[in-house]
Image (tube, rainbow, N blue to C red):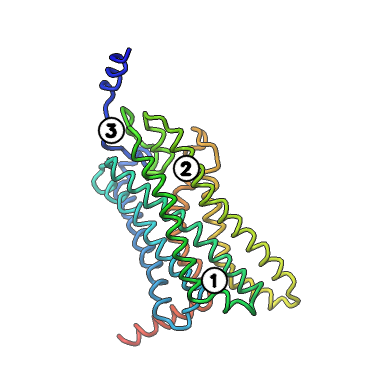
Amino acid sequence: MQHVKNSEWQNRTTITHFILLGFGNVEDLNVFLFLLFLAIYLVTLSGNLLIVALVMVEQHLHTPMYYFLANLSFLESCYTSTILPRMLVGFATRDQTISLVGCILQMHFFSTLAATECYLLAVMSYDRYLAICKPLHYATLMNERTCILLVSASWTIGLLLITILTCLLSELRFCNQNAIDHFLCDFTPIVRLSCSDTQVVETAAFITSSIGILPTFLITVTSYGFIITTVLKIPSNTGKQKAFSTCSSHLTVVSLFYGSLIFVYVLPTTEKFKDLNKVFSFLYTVLNPIANPFIYSLRNKEVRTSLRKTFNHFRGGF
């Protein structure tokens, strides 16, 4: 009996590479898709890094809200850099293979940044809650030390949660099947291909997701519940608009992020929802990072003013 089991394991081919099926059979569109995603990547990087640079250079943007925004923009730059360069290589070379180690590393960095973003968005929501609901205590409660502590905690917790998951994932065996029906190495598609017992890693994923998403989502929703209640109590329409304008950009970003995240990880992962899952994965991994700089610059008067001042400075220099 033992000999039969050993023979079965020997007959299984150990997988060292995966094939990312991406968006299906689109070889005729490779050049177009390469140029499209290259443009998206360059605009995403330049837009987010421009916000980081503005916050660093402009003295009047040295406030907690913009400190958190700069961290979010830096995170979005890293986020898109874990996904799009690999896609660009695939479109340019028509080679969709990725090594097992490379796939797990992509999942690790991508998931770490996603978990960190959950915490950063919660921190930004709490910051807006203090600014609008506790304005007299805001400067004391949200001081420089607190800001650094909150951002450090966001990055540290995100990294620790996903590192545990990555260590468990790296222990799995992969044999025979190596085609991932996705454009990136996400957790669920990888686990599905394993020929090991995945109960432990799936339980760990449920626990880490609960720790990473549920508390941060509740903090965000609760903060905006108090903010909306406080804003509605302001007697003048001008006061209401002024108060809400300080958090409308962040509320838009939060809605886009959690909306797409819920569709990806809450909808059943059946054949029926497979393509829809890809669409919403694309939304929060690729489109959200490119949209965020435009949302903040178009809706935020101080960012628009700083951008105009910077462009006028460079134009005057020439």
Q: Residue most toward the front?
A: 2
Task: State left or right for residue 298 relative to residue 190.
Answer: right
Residue 37 lies, with reference to residue 144, above or below; the image says above
Q: Quadrant of residue 173?
A: top left
Looking at the rendered structure, the secondary structure element under dot 1 is helix
Image coords of residue 119 (percent x, y) = 50, 59
Which residue bears the numbered disc 1? Answer: 299
Kind of residue at badge 2? Ala
Question: 72 or 51, which lies in front?
Answer: 72
Question: Residue 126, can we see it?
Answer: yes
Whole-number angstrom distance, CA of label 3 to CA of label 2: 23 Å
Q: Which residue bears the numbered disc 3? A: 15
- Which badge, 1 or 2, is on the more N-terminal residue? 2
For the image, the number of numbered tags is 3
Say which quarter of the image contains residue 240.
Answer: bottom right
Q: Residues within 10 Å of mark 3 (few under 14, many from 20)?
A: some
* Callout 2 crowding tier (Cα within 10 Å): few <14, some 14–19, many ≥20: many
Of the residues tagged 1 and 2, which is closer to the observer? 2
Which of labels 3 and 2 is toward the front? Answer: 2
Q: Which mark is residue 205?
A: 2
Who's the residue at 69% across and 78% down the image? 238
Distance, label 1 to label 3, CA atoms, is 49 Å
**Local SS, label 3:** loop
